[in-house]
Amino acid sequence: MTVHAQHGQPRKVMVEAQEVCKHYGPLEVLKGINLKVHQGEVVCIIGPSGSGKSTLLRCMNHLEHVNAGRLYVDGELVGYRQEAHKLYELKPSEVCLRRRDIGMVFQHFELFPHMTALENLCLAPTVVLKRARAEVEREALEMLQRVGLSDRAGYYPSQLSGGQQQRVAIARALTMNPKIMLFDEPTSALDPELVGEVLKVMRDLAASGMTMVVVTHEMGFAREVADRVVIMDGGRIIEDGPPADIFSNPRSERARTFLERLLA
């Protein structure tokens, strides 16, 4: 599927998975995944539990190692370098430098509990990017304002609601000025009344043109915000297309069964 920019030129491919496989011993979790995500696209990945959605997302950030195939982000191999026909795993320091272009938001926030919201935002830019603290703090405060939390800069995670913690986590990822944002079930750990505030931030981020890959059970968000919806099952992609097509006319029986149960 080729995505065209307004002036007719193809958009850059920001994420490309080529025959990606992942197994844990005899358990095959990803079975030859092929996927492209173009610059500015929002791709929502849905599917039953255990279908490999979160594993695929974690492989994109080299939090999990692929056992076969290739994964590229912005044209660079994730976690490896290639010399001739051989792959060599990067050193942890090199992985960290590559990872700075990939923002990731987890299901359970993963904030440092002993740091305030502002300190959580400032840590990576000052340590990884070696930027001046004063400049980073100024930008971090702007990010907190962007997610509606400018009055919570001095609060610790334990003093924030789940929705506020997740918005801090999104702001923290954005302080690294990533080229792509990965979201792994960002609302599933939240009380229902807090889901909306996180989805609003994600909608605003999508509207700004950020490339996003979102593993989610929020079908309303996928239907409204996604450019494409991908359905995974059993470690494979079984559907990939615009939300209107996926939700109204899925091609496979397995996808129909999953959506009927989910949307009933």
Image (cartoon, rainbow, N blue to C red):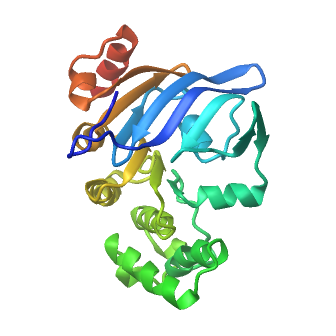
* Depicted 88 relative to depicted 107: above or below: above
Q: Quadrant of the C terminus?
A: top left
Q: Residue 118 at x, y = what percent?
A: 50, 80
Q: Of residues 2 and 156, which is closer to you in this image? A: 2
Q: Of residues 100 and 194, which is closer to you in this image? A: 100
Q: Residue 80 at x, y = what percent?
A: 71, 43
* Depicted 228 relative to depicted 137: above or below: above
Is residue 264 at all visible to an observer of this figure? no
Q: Quadrant of the N terminus?
A: top left
State the count of labels.
0
Residue under the point 66% across and 47% down: 63
Residue farthest toward the top in the current orientation of the protein:
253
Residue under the point 61% across and 40% down: 59
Residue farthest toward the bottom in the current orientation of the protein:
134
Q: Residue 61 at x, y = what percent?
A: 60, 48
Q: In the image, 89: left or right of 48?
A: right
Q: Of residues 47 and 264, which is closer to you in this image? A: 47
Quarter of the image for residue 199 reads bottom left
Is residue 122 at all visible to an observer of this figure? yes
Q: Residue 154 at x, y = what percent?
A: 48, 85
